[in-house]
Amino acid sequence: MATTSPPLAEPEGITLDIEGQRPPFIRRFSDSVVRFAQSSPIGMVAVGVWVLMFIMAVFAPILSPFDPLEADYGAIRAAPTTEHILGTDQLGRDLLSRIIYGARITLIVSITAVFIGDLIGFVWGIASGYLGKRFDLISQRVVDVLMSFPGLILALLLLVVLGAGLVTVIVAISVTRIPSATRVTRSVVLSIKEMSYVEAAKMIGASNIRIMVRHVAPQVVAPILVVATLHLGGAIFAESALSFLGMGIPPPAPSWGNMLGGVLAAAFRPPWWLVIFPGVAITIAIMAANLFGDAFRDFLDPKLRQRID
Amino acid sequence: MSKYLFNRLLIAIPTIFGVTVLIFLAMRVIPGDPLQLIVSESDGIYVLSEEELQALRASLGLDRPYHLQYMDWIAQVISGDMGSSFWNKEPISGMILRRGPISAQIALMAVLLSWLIGVPIGMLSAMWRNTMMDHLSRVGITVFIAVPSYWLGLLIILFTVLVFSWRPPITIIQLWEDPLGNLSMTVLPAMALGLGLSAGTARMARSAALEVLFEDYIRTARSKGLRETLVVWRHVFKNAMLPVVTTTGLALGGLLGGAVSVETAFAVPGLGKLLVQGMTERDWMMIQNLVLLYGLIYVIINLLVDLSYAFLDPRIRYE
């Protein structure tokens, strides 16, 4: 370039007070919550249900009328009364207290499992999609293999090997979330890879790691958040089903799933309260997770719908 | 079409290989060996001395190198020998042949049910959008997608026991031996599985039909004076079915997994019940071969679903 560029304006004159224009995080967060509530009242109700579940889990010792593990052999399989509002189980334990404590396991397992599984899928999907070539090819065959098992069967296989328990259930369920998280992330990355700003970053010599972290990853956060919220319901179902089958959370710990295990086998007259109440709790938790997931998806990006279904 | 078929089959081979490796690794390498699982699980109940363990290992071929064990296993499976149960020495292939038809029947009936219920509800809901019927069905869909299938099964049993004092039979009755007895065993589990599935089908049918309803060719069909029933059947229904097939295909994985818990709830003597039983008893040959069977079935189903897209929609091609 032979022509001289016009002298730049005084640097002091054009400094932008970027921090000053941007409201603090709390303000931005609460604004988004208000906008979310306006866009989807049902989604907000679902959030309310989850907040209630959190309160139940955190304040379980205060809220529950009895010790969830204390057997009362004087009141075995007692139908709901004013003392035991939801009745008692086969060891005389108060069902209401067990359901309140059960919220802890449901929340811990579902949130941790989804977080771990989707985080792995997120990182793996970015690496696989961005690096491409042989790494992508091998990664995708591995994902194929993980996808070749029905989720619950894969989780069962892992639990046989690892043994039942809280941590192993979380591991088993998170593994079953990895393939779809990887696939969604990868598909988004494949389209971002072609964007001109990624090309520009490559031109000025940015390293692969830097491009993945600074330019690609931020674009995938929204889709993976949506996937994660939609995974929550599935994770709750998986935990409850595994515990129901006796391979998940071992008794006597109160999990909504293991409370349902074998309830109809032993008794001559089936204790309806033992069947109905834990199942209602599971259904409400899953429904709230699904409704929030749907609303969140439409809120973040109405077009995302096609990419995920 | 034949090239597509070939490519798709080619890609299934490494997948199946990976499936076998994953199962083998999970069963042999991580816990040490399968006997370790049994011994560690039954502390104090079933104690084996070190010599007994060694002898047992040798008799089961577990003292050989991993790659030889792996090849032995694959050779066995290919020759149709699934080994036998660790505890009662019953051959596993016999159990699969006896119980497999029951599980397959329940799964097929569930899919059929989900179509019979889901497709009409989804179509009507789309056509009468924002009416009372539409709102009701959408609420129903939301609820039934969330209800765990095994809990629905428990509710159904509870209902039949309390109202009719009747429990579904738990012995194996094949359809060709006693159709009525067989149905009394399979209809309720199929219902428990199928109702959740029909909610998913209805949801997909509704959104697919809504998309088609606003296509230009529907307006054309109406403006040329075609009867509404013909418009619906010939144009809307036909074009809305592809996504419905897709969701059913994708849902089959969940169905296979869900069937395990539903069979346990109903105590149906199917494959799922056998798997859970094998897992609680640490019957490792049974676990290994049944999980392989589930994996293979799922791979084949996915293959068929992919091929059915290409068949149903000629625009879809595999690169």
Image (spheres, coloured by chain):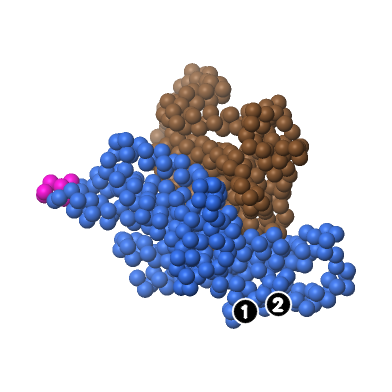
Q: Chain of mark 1?
A: B
Query: Residue farthest to the left?
Result: B224
Q: Chain of mark 2?
A: B
Q: In this rendering, is residue A101 above or below A182?
A: above
Is B220 inside the magenta-drawn segment?
yes
Q: Measuring 66% from the left and 32% from the top, which residue is drawn there?
A: A84
Front residue of this view, candidates A74 and A30: A74
Q: Which residue is mark 1?
A: B81
Q: Which residue is mark 2?
A: B68
- Letter of the chain in brown: A
Give x and y (percent) for residue A1. Answer: 42, 39
Find numbered disc 1 in the image and state the secondary structure of the residue it sits on. loop
Look at label 2 and name its amino acid.
Leu
Find numbered disc 2 in the image and state the secondary structure of the residue it sits on. helix
Q: Quadrant of residue B109?
A: bottom left
Q: Measuring 71% from the left and 63% from the top, which residue is drawn there?
A: B281
Q: Residues within 10 Å of mark 2 (few under 14, many from 20)?
A: few
Q: Measuring 37% from the left and 55% from the top, which residue is drawn there?
A: B115
Q: Colour of chain B?
A: blue
Q: Measuring 19% from the left and 51% from the top, which residue is drawn there?
A: B229
Give x and y (percent) for residue B145. Answer: 47, 45
* Residues at marks 2 and 1, CA–CA distance in whole angstroms: 17 Å
Side of B163 relative to B211 (left or right): right
Mark sitting on residue A285? none
Front residue of this view, candidates B5 and B195: B195
* Magenta-tinted stretch: B219-225
Front residue of this view, candidates B312 and B132: B132
Look at label 1 and name its amino acid.
Asp
